[in-house]
Amino acid sequence: MSRENPLRGEPEDRLEACPTQYGAGLVNVHRAEGRFYLQLGHWEKRLLMELLELYPRTGSTGLRRSNAKLRPEVEASQRLLDEALAEHRTETKKRMEALLADPNRFEKTEAGARLSLTPPEVEWFLQLLNDIRVGSWVLLGSPEGKVSQLNEQTAPYVWALEMSAYFQEHLLEAMEGET
């Protein structure tokens, strides 16, 4: 069975592919020489890469529109905002792709890989993860509290929301430990 997508296949296949990671979490973030290093297990690197492929997860900001016509200046402002956000997402996607394509960023280790980021890149990476997380939440219908139904349609959004939070948590803990 192909293991290209860690979310596909039977549960036993997923467990076999990463027997030690379930519940154990290998992500370790430390700081040295002015950089943050994320030590990822093989499985976690695959999950992170798949998660980042989802960017951008959000669409237009879209003012909640009713049938009432908005004032022309509000419409113009919304168009400008949408254009600026689209440009920002395009630039962020290019930056992310360049970072991930840089052979010096992911160093292979026995346990998996080590991702190297500067402090400003960590801030940017956290925002990237948050954009995926919030976009997934919006696509779930912006639920208050827990998602009430987990099914074929909602599972990918719940997965992205939770995995974004997982990586954000580890990065934030490392940043707090350094302040």
Image (cartoon, rainbow, N blue to C red):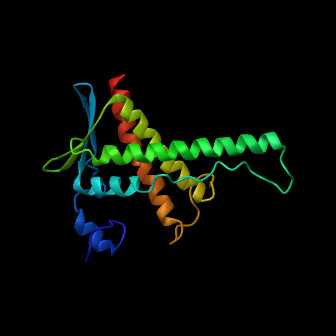
- The x, y position of residue 121, in whole percent, is 37, 34
Q: Tell me: 112 left or right of 137.
A: left
The residue lying furthest to the right in this view is: 68
Q: Quadrant of residue 176?
A: top left
Q: Is residue 89 above or below residue 31?
A: below
Measuring 52% from the left and 67% from the top, which residue is drawn there? 150
Q: Quadrant of the C terminus?
A: top left
Relative to the observer, which residue lies in front, 81 or 7? 81
- The x, y position of residue 122, in whole percent, is 37, 35
Relative to the observer, which residue lies in front, 49 or 90? 90
Q: Is residue 102 above or below residue 155?
A: above
Q: Tell me: 151 left or right of 4.
A: right
Q: Tell me: 27 left or right of 138.
A: left
- The x, y position of residue 75, in whole percent, is 77, 45
Q: Is residue 52 above or below residue 3?
A: above
Q: Quadrant of the N terminus?
A: bottom left
- The x, y position of residue 76, in whole percent, is 75, 42
The residue lying furthest to the top in this view is: 179
